[in-house]
Image (tube, rainbow, N blue to C red):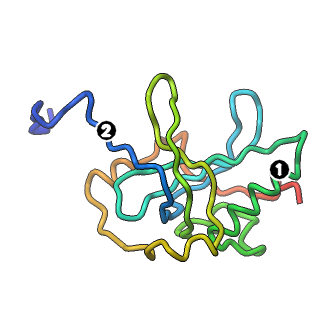
Amino acid sequence: MINWNYDANDYSANKTNLLDEGKYRVRIINAIETVAKNGTEGLEISLEVNGHSNKLRYYIWYNRENAARTNQLLGEFFNSFDISAGERSSCENWLGKTGAVYVMHDVYKGRQIAKVAFCLNRDQQTSLPAWTETQPTRVDVNDMAMSPKETFVPRKFGDLCPF
């Protein structure tokens, strides 16, 4: 058996590492096409937060009844992360791109969470510090591990893209 050297004094059921609401510089660490339980197609974008150990997920769902709304959300995302027209065909092209988001608090299943409210356009990012590289810690690497089901397999974005 592995000797984890677990110390129960380091655990607190009430400990939270919730990001404050506000603007954050973020970097794309994973992006996949996904399908919700109700059958709605969309994108799941995993983000790491500059200067924090937190990770965020941002979802863009394809709204069949309002394609203009979907295009608006995609445009805001592409602008924020400076994703050119030539890079939009594959989620793989987005990995490592930096942008900025506004984080807000919400309640999910009775628990307060931080979530991406919207992407900030390039002009709104000028007051944020530039991305700072940090050496990942062992915990960061394990947090980013994916199960075989979640393994990134790039697909063409054009299948979802309404334009």
Categorize mark 2 by other alpha carbons within 10 Å: few (<14), some (14-19), many (20+).
few
Categorize mark 1 by other alpha carbons within 10 Å: few (<14), some (14-19), many (20+).
some
For mark 2, what is the residue? 16
Residue at the top extreme, as displayed: 110
Q: Nearer the viewer, residue 115 or 85?
A: 115
Measured Cα–Cα span from mark 1 to mark 2: 34 Å
Q: Quadrant of residue 163?
A: bottom right
Q: Nearer the viewer, residue 93 or 23?
A: 23
Task: Judge left or right: residue 151 versus residue 81.
Answer: left
Residue type at the position of mark 1: Arg
Q: Is residue 157 above or below residue 98?
A: above
Provide the secondary structure element on which disc 2 rests: loop
Mark 1 or mark 2: name the one nearer the start of the chain: 2
Q: Is residue 80 above or below residue 146?
A: below
Task: Judge left or right: residue 45 versus residue 42.
Answer: left
Q: Nearer the viewer, residue 53 or 123?
A: 123
Task: State the residue at coordinates (77%, 36%).
Answer: 40
Q: Is residue 21 above or below residue 9?
A: below
Q: Is residue 5 above or below residue 21?
A: above
Residue type at the position of mark 2: Thr
Q: Are marks 1 and 2 in contact (CB under 8 Å)?
A: no
For mark 1, what is the residue? 69
Q: Position of residue 45 (x, y in %)?
A: 59, 52
Task: Judge left or right: residue 138 versus residue 23.
Answer: left
Q: Position of residue 136 (x, y in %)?
A: 31, 62
Q: Quadrant of the N terminus?
A: top left
Provide the secondary structure element on which disc 1 rests: helix
Task: State the residue at coordinates (76%, 65%).
Answer: 89
Total tally of numbered discs in the picture: 2
Q: Quadrant of residue 6?
A: top left
Q: Position of residue 61 (x, y in %)?
A: 74, 44
Task: Judge left or right: residue 26 versus residue 136.
Answer: right
